[in-house]
Image (cartoon, rainbow, N blue to C red):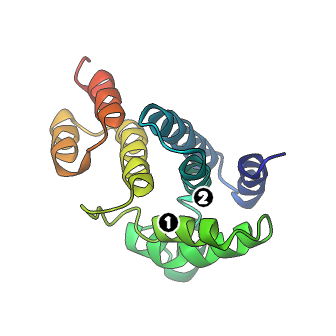
């Protein structure tokens, strides 16, 4: 099994929520597709896929510590949880550090950020917009605010503007 497969298995074991497992699978699939269409290198794809699978790893410890899954708590608790999980699977410090950075910022919407984080923003928003039933005005606002990739923007528009 490659690293992505091992992370997938660990995350399905880690999560106790079918809804959260379904969520990270959808974000991973969209991130993978966007990353490939945007021409990411194999190394960046490895980081992107690891981050997509673990992006919400902070929900469990945030719920335990703060009784809340708010984004700021996910960002606070997620990197250490990811560090523990990923360290069991790889000694690649650069990958672990990059994934932890993404997890620690995936709700912050930094304008100047690595393409991997940008793709996680976009894929996570596309999935959340559907799961949360956002209205079209919220989708349009998000597109203007933080969508930058050609493929993420195309998918968002196909899914939400043609309904």
> Residue 103: which disc?
1
Residue 11 horizontal side relative to residue 101, left or right: right
Q: Position of residue 131 (x, y in %)?
A: 42, 40
Whole-number angstrom distance, CA of label 1 to CA of label 2: 7 Å
Q: Position of residue 15 (x, y in %)?
A: 69, 57
Q: Position of residue 14 (x, y in %)?
A: 73, 61
Instruction: Please tell me which residue is depicted at 26% across the width and 44% down the height of the picture.
Output: 148
Residue 21 horizontal side relative to residue 5, left or right: left
Residue corresponding to mark 2: 54
Residue 160 horizontal side relative to residue 21, left or right: left
Between 126 and 110, the residue placed more toward the observer is: 110
Residue 104 horizontal side relative to residue 12, left or right: left
| Image quarter of residue 137 | top left
Name which of mark 1 and mark 2 comes first in the sequence: 2
Residue at the extreme right: 1
Q: Are marks 1 and 2 in contact (CB under 8 Å)?
A: yes
Instruction: Please tell me which residue is depicted at 22% across the width and 36% down the height of the picture.
Output: 135
Within 10 Å of disc 2 (Cα), the crowding (few <14, some 14-19, many 20+) is many
Q: Position of residue 33 (x, y in %)?
A: 50, 33
**Image quadrant in which the N terminus is located:** top right
* Element type at mark 1: helix
**Image quadrant in which the C terminus is located:** top left
Residue at the extreme bottom: 65
């Amino acid at each position: 099994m490659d690293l992505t497969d091992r992370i997938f298995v660990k995350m399905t074991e880690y999560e106790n929520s079918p809804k959260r497992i379904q969520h990270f699978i959808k974000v991973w699939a969209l991130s993978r597709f966007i990353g490939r269409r945007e021409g990411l290198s194999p190394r960046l794809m490895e980081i992107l896929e690891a981050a997509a699978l673990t992006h919400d790893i902070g929900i469990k410890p945030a719920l335990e510590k703060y009784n809340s899954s708010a984004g700021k708590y996910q960002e606070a608790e997620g990197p250490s949880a990811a560090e523990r999980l990923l360290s069991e699977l790889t000694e690649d410090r650069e990958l672990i550090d990059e994934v932890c950075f993404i997890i620690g910022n995936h709700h912050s919407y930094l304008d100047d950020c690595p393409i991997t984080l940008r793709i996680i923003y976009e894929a996570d928003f596309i999935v959340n917009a559907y799961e949360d039933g956002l209205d079209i005005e919220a989708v349009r606002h998000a597109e203007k605010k933080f969508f930058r990739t050609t493929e993420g923007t195309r998918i968002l528009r196909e899914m939400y503007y043609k309904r």
